[in-house]
Amino acid sequence: MSVGLTKSRFINTFKCYVNYALSRFGLVRFTHMPAFVSVEPAAICQLHCPECPVGMGNKSEKATQKTPFMSREVWERVLGDIKETAHTVQFYFQGEPLLNKDLPAMIAEAHEAGLYTILSTNAQALTPEMAEALVKAGLSRIIISMDGLTQDTYGAYRIGGSVEKVKIALQWLQKAKSVCASSARSSLVIELQCLRLQSNEHEWCDFKKQYKTLGADRLVFKTAQLYNYSAGHPLMPSDPRYSRYSQGEDGLYHRKPLHRGCLRVWSGVVITTTGEVLPCCYDKNHSYAYGNIMNTPLAELFTNENARAFRNAALHEKPQICQECWR
């Protein structure tokens, strides 16, 4: 089956947008399923990024109870619950997805179900064989994190990683696309993603000039979420336009104003390695879990009391994880 928006997916997505629009006027209803799902293939990572809970080892007790990898049993339950109504599945949350050896098979099964598939990785574990397997699996888009063009700038954030491995991985992916050029599964989009940091701000123009030469099809810059930023942060960009934080009259840095409402918690969920269902990727400590898909169907979890309470809070009260969001 090719990737596409079937009738059931179109109807579900339409209901999602209508329900979200109505919620902005105080009419809260749930007549749809998640339009997209993020799954966590692995809960571990080989890097020690300073602003990542996994890299910092700063996770709640509940989060540390996760198994390292999503099992076949959990994945099959997820796919069975989403394949008729969701249009996209994202293979990333907190850990490094490529560490799960079942990942190509998971992507292939999602592709066969007609789902658009996205993978985000630091590319440290990518090999020529893995690159070919991902392309053959029908992966739609791969996001490669690369926050510097030299080892010094890259290593300022991706601690323990090698920028040369990333550059080589990009070439392997392009080669795999070329080898599979005659296949319908060779339409992989390679996206290079760079966090805007003070350590790499002098390279932003060079990124724009070089990303295609490096092997990427597109380049995306993202602002960085930082912890303990009130007194400033060494990774915070010099230009406040590219930071999520601004300096107030008190001399301290504050989170820039948030918008009201959030389509994301109406349209999708995150599912961890153990099958726990979370409202979004900012719930890194599993503080607002809806329940577990291994015990309860996703259709029930998506509309249960926990889910309703969180969405209502997202509309009006702004839970802590919403205060750190940049959507």
Image (cartoon, rainbow, N blue to C red):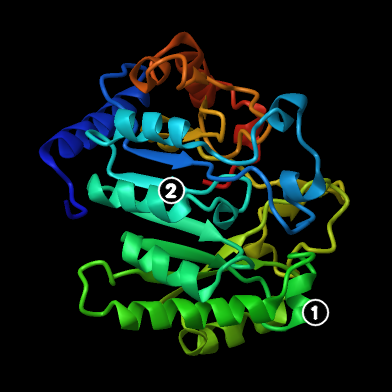
| Residue 198 at x, y percent in the picture | 76, 70
Residue 136 shows up from this direction = yes
Q: Residue at x 87, y 51 (%)?
A: 251
For the view shown, which residue lies furthest in the top direction?
305
| Residue 179 at x, y percent in the picture | 32, 82
Closer to the camera in the image, 35 or 23: 35
| Residue 255 at x, y percent in the picture | 70, 45
* Relative side of 54 to 122, left or right: right
For the view shown, which residue lies furthest in the left direction?
7
Which residue carries the number 2 mark? 90
Residue 265 to residue 313: above or below = below
Closer to the camera in the image, 32 or 101: 101
Q: Residues within 10 Å of mark 2 (few under 14, many from 20)?
A: many
Residue 140 shows up from this direction = no
Which residue carries the number 1 mark? 152
Q: Secondary structure at mark 2?
A: strand
Q: Residue at x 66, y 57 (%)?
A: 224
Tally of marks: 2
- As shown in the figure, which amino acid type bears the numbered disc 1? Asp
Dot 1 or dot 2, earlier in sequence:
2
Q: Are marks 1 and 2 in contact (CB under 8 Å)?
A: no
* Relative side of 116 to 275, left or right: left
Q: Residues within 10 Å of mark 1 (few under 14, many from 20)?
A: some
Q: Residue at x 16, y 51 (%)?
A: 1
Q: Residue at x 33, y 19 (%)?
A: 299
Measure how far apart labels 1 and 2 are at the Cα level: 30 Å
